[in-house]
Image (tube, helix red, strand yellow):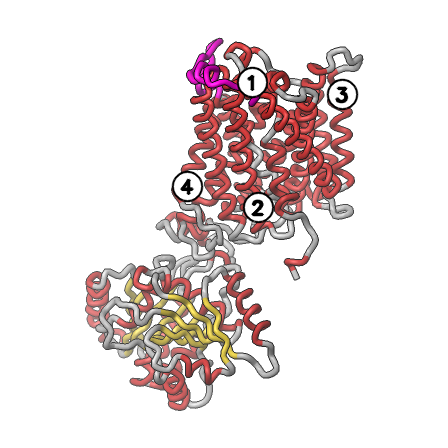
Amino acid sequence: METTRKGFGTFGGVFTPCTLTILGVIMFLRLGEVVGQSGFVNALIILLAAKSITLLTTASLAAISTNTRIKGGGAYFMISRSLGVEFGTAIGVFFFLAQAISVAMYIIGFTEAFFQIFPSVPVSFTTVATAVNVISFIFVFIGAGWTLKLQFFILVALLLSILSFVVGAGQMASMHTLMDNARAGYVGGDSFFSMFALFFPAVTGIMAGANMSGDLRDPAKSIPFGTFASILFTAVVYLLMILLLAAANPRAELILNNMIIRDNALFPLLIPVGIFSATLSSALGSMMGAPRILQSIAKDDVCSWLKPFARVSGGEPRPATVMTFLIAQGAILAGNLNTIAPVITMFFMITYGTLNLACFYEVYSRNPSFRPSFRLHSWATALAGSLSCLAVMFLINPLWAGVSICGMALVYWTVSRTEIVARWGDVTSGMALERVRSSLLALQDERYHPKNWRPIILALSTTSWTRTNLAQYAYWLAAGRGILTLGQVLHGEIESKMDVKARSERMLRKYIAEEELEAFPVVVVEEGLEEGLKALLQCHGIGGIKPNTLVIGLGEAVASPEDFFMTISHALFFEKNVVCVRQNESLARWSAPGSDITIIWGGMDDGVLMLLFAHLIKLNKEWRSHEISVLCKVPPQTDRGNLHEKMQGILNLARVSARVVIVDDSEDALGCCAGHSGLTILPMPRPAGKPVEYIQALSEQVEGLGDVLLIASAGDVTMDS
């Protein structure tokens, strides 16, 4: 089973890497300056604003990670599967470079702190930095398991150093000093925004856990929970440290003394340990994450020259790890932290912003396949996160922000010109359904994928559209996520029927307007009903938008069994899903019957489509208070508990909320619905035998039930859609 595979859990695989990356060198060496210049009030506002951006981004991260089966590659995997191969590759390349160069940044920070604490060491800066880079590479090359085990010890050392500061600064704190440091006192041309720019890199690191997605036991659970827990925990740490720094030190000391945290600590020797732990752990985290991003891009075969980096040795992406080491070493030899830090921050912000954009597109396109189990997100939060990241980029460094965006656009253009066909679904075609002519042209070139499945419904009447029941249910099935067409077939001599056709189209348009339906009319004329039906099923639609579902009323069967039998047979032959509606005509218009939706489970063949249509119906305002129940019969000699667990697993995979009811056999299932005032959904038997006998069997099957949908699937819907 997938759930029993080996991998890292939430604490070791997500919380620890995120926390160690967030509680980094900025906290130890620059937090005092931020508090001293901004005052603790503005410092808290800076903390709140920075954490708000990362919380918005994490909400988008959680939504995508609980809707998609996350594999290796973290942000690259999620963005490429949402916005497409071009965006994914552009972001993946820049995020990989950011992670690789981050290794150098953290190691350079470590080395600078090392020489401040041990100024008389007779070795060069480059020698120490190179030695640390080699040691980090060896740990990661051996395996992520060794590195994560080492990170547990680093986390303990880091927390002990913070505790030492808290106790020491707490003994020195006074309310008088805190009030003196309440207001801002900027020096040297600095401002609130420059202090925000200085502090913001301290809260990045939320992708450290997502970068390990391919090595997690349960990414969909671990990534949201572990990342949110890390953000909240580090927020408390920063909040406490800001207040204690302001309460224990005069302003001048905060601004001028980069080692103020060491001087405040109860045990000063623990602070260098914390600094070294923070920088080393961040370097190790980036050294682990970067190769997995590069490997994921290479595995997708986007660029042929990246193929060697797709190889795995001993479960580790070692070729990609070697490349990460070489890039980091090159940046170390450049040795200019002030030059590479803005570039890294820009790349991180582009990644965070695009991740928010991916979530925004998923929500805004109203794609039925986007059903994340994480609910605390919306298009507004995703858009706010994306715009916030863009604003932060230009706030920190307008020049590097512009350069980074142009670089990403160049990679996007290069990849798009290669005309790569992705082997996964994304929201490109989903958004195309929301646009008009230009989107239809774009959709024409898209490969179909079940992820992008939408209900494109053809509701058919062989008579005039004078009743609301069929159109009403067809509208509910589309649920504002698909496209609805009301069709009518007129049979007779084409030349003599053209006036009738025009009149029927006008009446149908009037009917759609009066009922306030989001639907399109279509009327065809053929010499025979069968010919007209074939033409409609094959030719109706444009480009990639062709009907995938036929909706027909059971009343058509009673009036003309042969025509109904023929209609169903042809629809299934042309691989269209079929929904047969039987509605209680006495109900008020546009009112949902009963209080629940009951699915009579008959297996996976039709069951997946039944679940999806039940989910779509429930999205309509008339049905939101209804509950979905799945009645499942127990085969002979089958354990009821195991069947219930299996059925619940199917519902979890489909991401549809429903109650499972186990009954002894199919007769009991139908018996449970006798007199049922709600909606019953049944699998529809395939046409066989004589039309009259087939219709009689259908009528007997739904006898005694309220509203009924009989569903036959063409097999174009999967659990992943």
Which of the marked residues, 1 or 4, is nearer the chain's N terminus? 1
Mark 4: amino acid: Thr
Q: Real-space Cα distance between discs 2 and 4? A: 18 Å
- Residue 164, image x and y in percent? 63, 25
Q: Nearer the viewer, mark 1 or mark 2?
A: 1
Q: Real-space Cα distance between discs 3 and 2? A: 35 Å
Q: Nearer the viewer, mark 1 or mark 4?
A: 1
Mark linked to residue 223: 2
Residue 300 visible? The answer is: no
Could you tell me which residue is drawn at 77 percent across and 46 percent down?
313
Which residue was labeled with disc 1? 172
Q: Is residue 169 left or right of residue 696?
A: right
Mark linked to residue 381: 4
Mark 3: amino acid: Val
Mark 1: amino acid: Met
Could you tell me which residue is drawn at 54 percent across and 69 percent down?
647
Q: Is residue 694 left or right of residue 291?
A: left
Mark linked to residue 128: 3
Q: Are marks 3 and 4 in contact (CB under 8 Å)?
A: no
- Residue 177, image x and y in percent? 48, 15
Which of the marked residues, 2 or 4, is nearer the chain's N terminus? 2
Mark 2: amino acid: Ile
Give the extent of the magenta segment: 170-195
Of 335 and 195, which appears nearest the observer? 195
Could you say whether the residue bearing mark 4 is in a helix, strand or loop? helix
Q: Real-space Cα distance between discs 3 and 4? A: 44 Å
